[in-house]
Amino acid sequence: MESYEALIGTLALTMGASWASGINLYAALLVLGLAGSSGNLDLPPDLEVLQDPMVIGAAGLMYFVEFFVDKTPGVDTGWDTIHTFIRIPAGALLAAGAVGDVTPALEIASGIMGGTLAATSHTTKAGTRAIINTSPEPFSNWGASITEDLMVFGGLWAALNHPVIFLCILLAFILIAIWLLPKIWAALKAIANTISGWFGKVESSLQSLPEESPVQASNGNPETDIGHNDTASFVDELARLEQLKHNGSLTDEEFEAAKRKLLI
């Protein structure tokens, strides 16, 4: 009986730590570290480092930062994107460490399962929050973030004190996630297509703008217009006329008349 309870307790801790890390890694580390340092939980040897005051302090600081970042619409999605590369590996490591001193094969298997569970909870959280961020009001975002925090604290408390109940709830979560993830993916694709359509309309509008005529481009200045068409020829012809005027071949009136013809 004791071995059965120990097995259920280890399984609940393994799955609970990896599941919680996918939602809020720093809250999970903080709960485990405080539970171990206070004597309320005998952490497995590989996880005893979590009860070190330095680790608890770092986890507490990062949880404080995430508490506010996670409640800022838009910023939380960027935070979740970055933490894709942190929460999932951490979930695998916590799961592997939670099984205790066992065979390497069992540790690897636990790490694989833990990483998969962390990826499931993280993807569900990140995808749901990205959809919620399409709403202009911030209250739904705040409500979702607070709910996630409560889920992590409540879930780990249940895993440590009522492992059987927690495992049943976890099974329900996995089934809901399997049903929900395709719908989240479809909604995110629709949002991406909508944004892409907006950019396409802007590009089409820019392409449909009429081109400026040479006179418009030069603000109606004939000399500038000449410069756009054949600047070199104009300068050469003007220099020839000035030379003829200087030689006396053209009067001032004839020079001005010829100059006006060049500008037409």
Image (cartoon, rainbow, N blue to C red):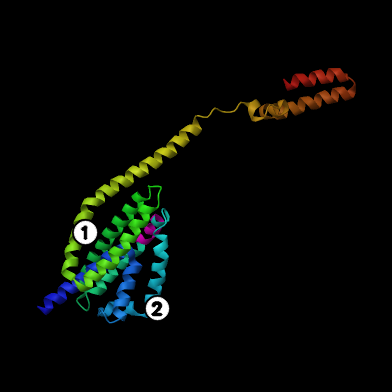
- How far across and how far down the image is residue 153, in percent? 29, 68
Residue type, mark 2 in image: Met
Is 211 placed left or right of 218 in the picture?
Answer: left
Confirm or deny contact between disc 2 and disc 1 (CB under 8 A): no
Name the residue at the left extreme.
Answer: 1
Viewer-closest of 249 and 59 = 59
Which quadrant of the rendered structure holds the N terminus?
bottom left
Residue shown at the point (40%, 73%) measured from the top left: 58
Q: Is residue 208 above or below residue 148?
A: above
Type of secondary structure dominating the magenta stretch: helix
Q: Is residue 83 above or below residue 51?
A: above
Residue type, mark 1 in image: Phe
Q: Which residue is mark 1?
A: 173
- How far across and how far down the image is residue 181, in percent? 25, 51
Q: Secondary structure at mark 2?
A: helix
Q: Is residue 88 visible in the rendered structure shown here?
A: no
The image quarter containing residue 149 is bottom left
Residue shown at the point (52%, 29%) measured from the top left: 209
Residue interval drawn in magenta: 77-84
Q: Secondary structure at mark 1?
A: helix
Q: Is residue 61 visible in the rendered structure shown here?
A: yes
Q: Which residue is mark 2?
A: 54
Viewer-closest of 75 and 103 = 75
The image quarter containing residue 113 is bottom left
| Residue 178 highlighted magenta (yes or no) | no
Mark before the other along the chain sequence, 2 or 1: 2
Viewer-closest of 149 and 245 = 149
- How far across and how far down the image is residue 224, in percent? 70, 29
Which quadrant of the rendered structure holds the C terminus?
top right
Tell us which disc is closer to us: 2 or 1.
1
Is 131 placed left or right of 161 in the picture?
Answer: right
Q: Is residue 22 above or below residue 73?
A: below
